[in-house]
């Protein structure tokens, strides 16, 4: 039998020099280690020497496991592991007390391999668990009182714990494409959805956004014309309400809720 036969694909080896060259400065001045799309199959131990970074992006690789040593990244606020082949997460992820963003979407996690220690991430604002193999989520996630956004889409869920549905600061819950019983669709519907309003000038909008905003404005004007209102209306001809694509710097949108 040939040596090494039957093993998985050999990924790219990340050296400390490569890792150092992959450090970027984020919008708010933090240090971001970006190793996404690098063909990594094994967690590079060399990056433990860079454990003082604020953000770590290992997304879109072929990782199957994150080691317990992830706990060394105590300054971490942003951890992106989406689109790997992760079958489990270490319990030590719960020690990352500064974490406010955690994306583990599009992996192979099951309810048994999702550590309950996630409930220790008291500062977590955004958690994405979509596109995994979860048939349930722990009710202990109800301890994440600061959580604003939760992604549970494309799993195997048939119910969502009340402790999660009633999180005090939860604004967005995406639980689409789960096998919820027809009689229990209310598990999704009552979740409050808060949309933010932003005002910008027309010159800052792309063509598609400008068209969408103009259509919405026309609808609003048509609605207003059907109502009698004697009072003088205020006019803001250069101000519209776009979506996030209107921003030149997407980093601002990525971090806009960090300190709210």
Image: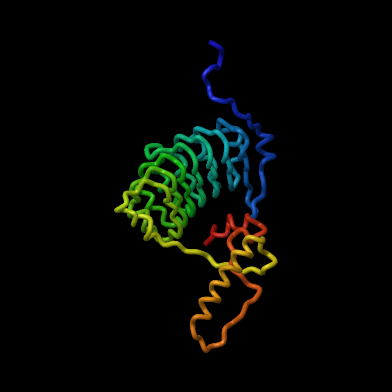
**Colour convention:** rainbow
Residue at horizontal 65%, vertical 32%?
A: 15
Q: Nearer the viewer, residue 223 or 253?
A: 223
Q: Position of residue 70 (x, y in %)?
A: 52, 38
x%, y% of residue 9?
57, 25
Residue 27: name its quadrant: bottom right
In the displayed orientation, state which residue is furthest to the left: 183
Query: What residue sits 53% from the left and 80% below the top?
Result: 225
201 lies left or right of 107: right
Whether residue 112 sits left or right of residue 84 in the image: it is: left
Residue most extreme to the bottom = 230
**Residue 171: x, y in percent?**
45, 60
Q: Nearer the viewer, residue 250 or 52?
A: 250
Residue 151 versus residue 86 in the image, above or below = below
Q: How many numbered tags mark residues here?
A: 0
Residue 142 pos. (x, y %): 37, 53
Seen in the picture, residue 249 relative to 7 is either above or below; the reply is below
* Of the pair 43 and 160, the residue shown nearer to us: 160
Q: Going 49% across and 44% down the picture, which residue do you hit?
A: 105
Measuring 61% from the left and 40% from the top, which residue is drawn there?
Answer: 36
């Amino acid at each position: 039998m040939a040596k090494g036969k039957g093993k998985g694909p050999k990924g790219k080896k990340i050296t400390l020099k490569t890792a150092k060259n992959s450090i970027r400065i984020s919008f708010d001045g933090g240090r971001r280690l970006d190793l996404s799309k690098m063909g990594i199959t094994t967690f590079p131990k060399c990056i433990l020497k860079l454990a003082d970074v604020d953000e770590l992006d290992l997304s879109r690789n072929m990782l199957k496991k994150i080691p317990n040593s992830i706990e060394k990244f105590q300054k971490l606020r942003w951890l992106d592991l989406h689109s790997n082949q992760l079958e489990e997460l270490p319990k030590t992820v719960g020690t990352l007390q500064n974490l406010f963003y955690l994306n583990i979407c599009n992996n192979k996690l099951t309810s048994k391999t999702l550590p309950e220690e996630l409930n220790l991430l008291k500062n977590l604002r955004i958690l994405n668990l979509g596109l995994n193999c979860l048939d349930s989520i722990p009710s202990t996630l109800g301890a994440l009182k600061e959580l604003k956004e939760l992604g549970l889409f494309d799993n195997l869920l048939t119910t969502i714990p009340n402790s999660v549905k009633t999180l005090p600061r939860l604004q967005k819950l995406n639980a689409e494409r789960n096998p919820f019983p027809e009689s229990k669709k209310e598990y999704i519907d009552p979740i409050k959805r808060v949309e933010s309003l932003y005002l910008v000038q027309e010159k800052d909008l792309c063509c598609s956004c400008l068209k969408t905003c103009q259509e919405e404005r026309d609808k609003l004007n048509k609605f207003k014309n059907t109502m009698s209102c004697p009072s003088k209306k205020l006019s803001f001809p250069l101000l519209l309400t776009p979506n996030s694509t209107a921003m030149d710097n997407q980093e601002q949108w990525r971090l806009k809720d960090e300190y709210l």
